[in-house]
Image (spheres, coloured by chain):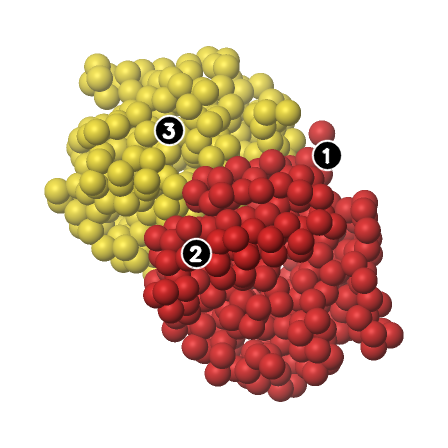
Chain colours: A yellow, B red
Amino acid sequence: MTTLADIRAAAERIRGHVHRTPILTSATFDRELGVRAFFKCENLQKVGAFKARGACNAVMALDAGSAARGVITHSSGNHAAALAWAAAARGIPAKVVMPDSAPKVKIEAVRGYGAEIRFCKVLERDAVCAAWQQQTGATMVHPFENPLVIAGQGTAALELIEDVGNLDAVIVPVGGGGLCGGTAVVVRSLLPNASMLGAEPLAVDDAARSMATGVRQPRVDNPKTWADCLLTGLGEPNFRLLRQHAVRVVTVDEQAMVDAALFCLQRMKIVVEPGSASVLAAIRSLGAEVRGKRIGLVLSGGNTDFAWLPR
Amino acid sequence: MTTLADIRAAAERIRGHVHRTPILTSATFDRELGVRAFFKCENLQKVGAFKARGACNAVMALDAGSAARGVITHSSGNHAAALAWAAAARGIPAKVVMPDSAPKVKIEAVRGYGAEIRFCKVLERDAVCAAWQQQTGATMVHPFENPLVIAGQGTAALELIEDVGNLDAVIVPVGGGGLCGGTAVVVRSLLPNASMLGAEPLAVDDAARSMATGVRQPRVDNPKTWADCLLTGLGEPNFRLLRQHAVRVVTVDEQAMVDAALFCLQRMKIVVEPGSASVLAAIRSLGAEVRGKRIGLVLSGGNTDFAWLPR
């Protein structure tokens, strides 16, 4: 299982490659909820998402021989772009299997970083990826179950706590659980009295149901949600991390999530994709429970085509 | 005329009230132009614009007696919100005269900070403001001709240079010229070899024509531009500052400006209002002249209703 030492090693490995992202505050948000909120802006990270951290850690940790054969993954978007970017940064080839339903803006990003792409149906992606991997000998870098990826994602929380000190709660979005798992390790190690929360859209609430039942639930098929970054089901090691560290998953409805993304755009002047804005919606839903608290929110990404924007 | 000492005094006065805004970089922008660009994010400033600096400096400098009678101004938006915010921060009343054509989002912001608003035609605003000022004894805080305002606006450039060190050029948008004048003082004092540039939309190019002819030109009436933050003509003391410090004004067309605002939104994940994005468009237009240079760009604001966004 991922430890704080793994995450500190990742932080050393990726330093200088990724941005140390800024932490913003919003007097309006604080006043609305009676909290002191610190927004860790991973939407301003390389490739527009925290995924740059995990992908970079996995790529930079490869030995020279493996690196020469390149890396491969499947991803609906942000991890694909992140791996393509990290591979380009090291000068090695990247191969990406993407669902044919992936947002155009994310496909273009992956292409822009020079990766080779194959498209397939969502349910075929494991098989397509495995076959391509066998042909090429590239190293598979799973978007959220890879331990180096999980450790890399945890580095955002390290920086957050270094920069703002003690927090009463930390919240991140939950999709595959790489960010949530890595963050939970950091929070439990450095802030033993803090609440560790995950935010999940109701339309893809497999993590909430997994935690409630104690049994990992399958991903929701064909959900109707703007949270395209959170469509994957919770990974197996991720589920164990979330259980080990007693993560509380808070679900949010679509309208609350879109309202939160609009708040980021109109009031905070930053682009946050709807799935990432779920963390604001989740904190809003907690009401009196969070009043007076210092809360860290990881804004995990900003890759969106704005189709959710009211017109 | 405004001096570096005035701007350093302003920086002391407003510290703790305004954000020390982050400086972002964009590998994509750097690669496109062969530059090293540093974006000073005043769109992430209090009230969503650098105007918080100048308004705060003017309000915090008032003696107790004047402060009690409050402040008054006329403004198409960002300065109005900034003065309303600064007055609220000091707990004194604010009165604002706004053109009836001001964007709804800016009117709402002013109201949200608790100011009293009167609407009028653009050309009547001096008279309406003067009459209201006489009735109330409030201190007039002109949006760009007030020396305390000009000094406050210069503090963004102080922080930029403190954070990134030497620069070959600094560019800011030019409207009334408060930001441009204050920045020019800082750049000429601290970076004697740097170019000091102003960016101005072609549709409202009075500053460019004023600098070219040596005679201050009147504002353009009813221009067709998305740069609603730059509709005012260049102020009188501002024109003298721009001349004294040999500011070079670079004009940009509407499409280049909107493309630059889109680049900020899609690639940098930040909301920059079109007039503010004119600085990216201006640097792009300089081509080979800027290659290899370290450039500071002040992104002056992020208050927009997105009406310019292609749908």
Other-residue count near label 3 (Cα within 10 Å), few / some / many at <14 / 14–19 / ≥20: many
Can you give x and y, in whole percent of width and height, for residue B193 in the image?
65, 85
Question: Which amino acid, mark 2?
Answer: Gly
Can you give x and y, in whole percent of width and height, for residue A276 in the image?
43, 34
Q: What separation in Å lies between label 1 and label 2 (alpha carbons)? A: 42 Å
Q: Which mark is residue B12?
A: none
Q: Chain of mark 3?
A: A
Can residue B308 be seen here? The reply is yes
Residue at 47%, 35% in the rendered image? A263
Tell which of B254 and A144 is nearer to you: B254
Q: Chain of mark 2?
A: B
Residue at 43%, 43% in the rendered image? B114
Disc 2 on helix, strand or loop?
A: loop
N-terminal label among 1 and 2 = 2
Q: Which residue is mark 1?
A: B310
Residue A135 lies left or right of residue B22; in this view the side is: right
Q: On the rendered image, what quadrant is the N terminus of chain A found in? A: top left
Q: What separation in Å lies between label 3 and label 1 (alpha carbons)? A: 28 Å
Residue B73 lies left or right of residue B203; in this view the side is: left
Question: Which amino acid, mark 3?
Answer: Ala
Residue at 50%, 49% in the rendered image? B95
Q: Which residue is mark 3?
A: A281
Figure check: B285 above or below B85: below
Q: Which residue is mark 2?
A: B70
Can you give x and y, in whole percent of width and height, for residue B20 in the image?
42, 62
Can you give x and y, in whole percent of width and height, for residue B45 in the image?
48, 55
Question: Which amino acid, mark 1?
Answer: Pro
